[in-house]
Amino acid sequence: MVYVTRREVFSAAHVLYNAEWSDSRNAEVFDKCANPRGHGHNYVLEVTIAGEIDPSTGYVIDLKLLKSIIKEQIIAKVDHKHLNYDVDFLQNIIPTAENIAVAIWNELVHRIPSGTLYSVKVHETENNCAEYKG
Amino acid sequence: MVYVTRREVFSAAHVLYNAEWSDSRNAEVFDKCANPRGHGHNYVLEVTIAGEIDPSTGYVIDLKLLKSIIKEQIIAKVDHKHLNYDVDFLQNIIPTAENIAVAIWNELVHRIPSGTLYSVKVHETENNCAEYKG
Amino acid sequence: MVYVTRREVFSAAHVLYNAEWSDSRNAEVFDKCANPRGHGHNYVLEVTIAGEIDPSTGYVIDLKLLKSIIKEQIIAKVDHKHLNYDVDFLQNIIPTAENIAVAIWNELVHRIPSGTLYSVKVHETENNCAEYKG
Amino acid sequence: MVYVTRREVFSAAHVLYNAEWSDSRNAEVFDKCANPRGHGHNYVLEVTIAGEIDPSTGYVIDLKLLKSIIKEQIIAKVDHKHLNYDVDFLQNIIPTAENIAVAIWNELVHRIPSGTLYSVKVHETENNCAEYKG
Amino acid sequence: MVYVTRREVFSAAHVLYNAEWSDSRNAEVFDKCANPRGHGHNYVLEVTIAGEIDPSTGYVIDLKLLKSIIKEQIIAKVDHKHLNYDVDFLQNIIPTAENIAVAIWNELVHRIPSGTLYSVKVHETENNCAEYKG
Amino acid sequence: MVYVTRREVFSAAHVLYNAEWSDSRNAEVFDKCANPRGHGHNYVLEVTIAGEIDPSTGYVIDLKLLKSIIKEQIIAKVDHKHLNYDVDFLQNIIPTAENIAVAIWNELVHRIPSGTLYSVKVHETENNCAEYKG
């Protein structure tokens, strides 16, 4: 079993806000992340596939193919977007790094043609990240 | 003459939009950066001071002091904010990296107690940055 | 299960020295790391928590809380300190990256209010690190 | 159990080419990676050892020793080389990151004097990497 | 005057070899860089433009345009190539970082539509780089 | 004129302390940097040489030679050392990043065999650095 990882980046805005709570409760829990107009990040996304090496190519998965799947299914939908409003697969969830990682996993898991999706890791800043392994 | 640099980071949203133009003209010029809800970045700010070394401290400027000036005058106003709406010193300008660098320079230039402000550099992503030297 | 990681940095001095050995044995085993006055590093600490996402917040753990626990329990005690002399929780151990990781784990494991401490990783340089998972 | 990692870098050329295929099939599968003269990378190699801490040294393994093993067995053979032609332990395999990671594992696994080889990770670019755990 | 920089990366092979010298003289001067089959790098290219900010856009130069010029004129010609054989604008020069920086400058200087080319910087590894300012 | 830069790293301890001042004055000015036992950093040193390209080599300076000069004259004397006590060329100065940069300049300026020393830059942390250009 070999693990291959592809890294992509996207720049997006978000707000942390629970619509079932009052503004003051949101401000108390989410602090500056609850700023109504939003703030943003250069997100770093790492997608890891686990599988055996195909001896005819030396690949677990063709990373050009993995790159194009991530670009089409994820990056095209989130890059230069506001994650609370503009992204179909993030509707009705609070866009924390944790929830983004799980949502991206759910978008990708049935679209990986060979190998097995092993991990989706989302870095929000150089100090904070979340990883989901299914 | 010695140059000392302090690096700080902030996370903010922005939109590139010229209010004097039609939406289609904005979309044509600014492309995905014109997405109305905004997107965001982890901005990296580098502030460089030029001066002579004080022999009693070995400092051009006390970096603890420079850090606190940058934190109070800049980071407190831009971190976790939407740069088009929430920041007094960015009102009525298009918040490109170029304009942000110039605006931060103008905020800092009269508040550096020793040495001389030499450069303000703003990295928008790992691939794009702007620098202003007055 | 989602894994969230918080990164913090601290600058400290240390010496690798076994007090039960002669100076020459220490020099032989620890080489330049045994320099008596010490040397130092910008340590990078990564603390990973594993848990389920709280649907009301989207958080496994509030990273502001995790940050404040790490700052109070660890960073305040090790930053700008000499690890062989100044740190209560490192007394009587040789402050290798391995031992520092285990000691930080022991300081944190009972102070994580939700989720489970999963990993403590200590980078000594850009080339060397140690990780402990309990 | 503690995991210690040593990072080394090497600069090498390679071509992805399956000698049993036609040139056009190679170009179709490997695309620009099949350019006959080759291209190259600054590879980043991370070797992780798992073991218990020796209480007399605080080490899982002396990283100076691990460094010298990696330098002698791997870096001396691959740095500033063309991986398709110049490296004995890469003969007759397609030098993808996956195959390089497995081949380096096989070179190192019997030469680690204490602890257990846990992982070999090869970064080909800042966006692509492969990891093998035996 | 504001300075804006665009960063791009490319992966290429090269050999340092002076065709007017004997092989032994080449080996003596260029050492392991003279390995006949070549080695390679992930080159990092930084192109800096100096100019005044256009008040209607906030741009010194549209970085999307600068990116597309660099991609078409440089990256398409050098990425996944062998710099000694495959690149028209590097014919008959020894492809050191210095010479690559100058050659890229010469390719770009007449193609920058607004602003002025200020600097071309080529990083060969994380430790070595060369910069040319015309 | 082309500028070539070599990067090296070293790990060292230091204390900021002015021997002509009282301990309380030192603590007031240097704060946690005045901790008597010292703290430390992974310093990053960047040395830049300016010169014309030698057409027979494509080099401004052979970076292998520059590397060996830096290793012998600087790194061998400061790596894994306490900068206040162990380094001849730092005696009787307060080892701030500013003073270290100037001292390294003075060590190197007469030992560069071709080209001209242009800049010495010392990064103390990822957030603080000092540069001296003579």
Image (tube, coloured by chain):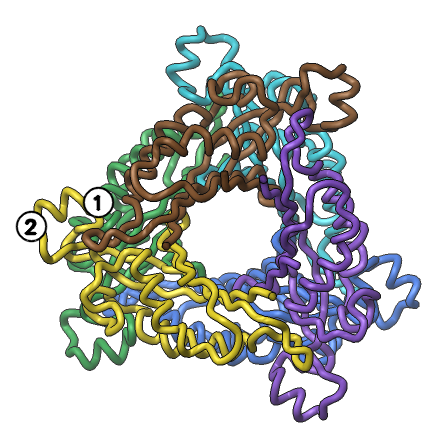
Chain colours: A yellow, B green, C brown, D purple, E blue, F cyan
* Residue B61 placement, left or right of F117: left
* Residue B80 placement, left or right of F95: left
Q: What residue would you read off at disc 1?
A: B77
Q: Can you see residue D117?
A: yes
Disc 1 secondary structure class: helix
Which kind of residue does numbered mark 1 sit on? Lys
Q: What residue would you read off at disc 2?
A: A22
The image shows residue B99 at horizontal and vertical percentages of: 28, 57
Tag in front: 2 or 1 = 2
* Residue A78 placement, left or right of D111: left
Q: Quadrant of residue E6?
A: bottom left
Distance CA(mark 2)–CA(mark 1):
24 Å
Q: Chain of mark 2?
A: A
The image shows residue D117 at horizontal and vertical percentages of: 68, 50
Q: Chain of mark 1?
A: B
The image shows residue D93 at horizontal and vertical percentages of: 75, 74
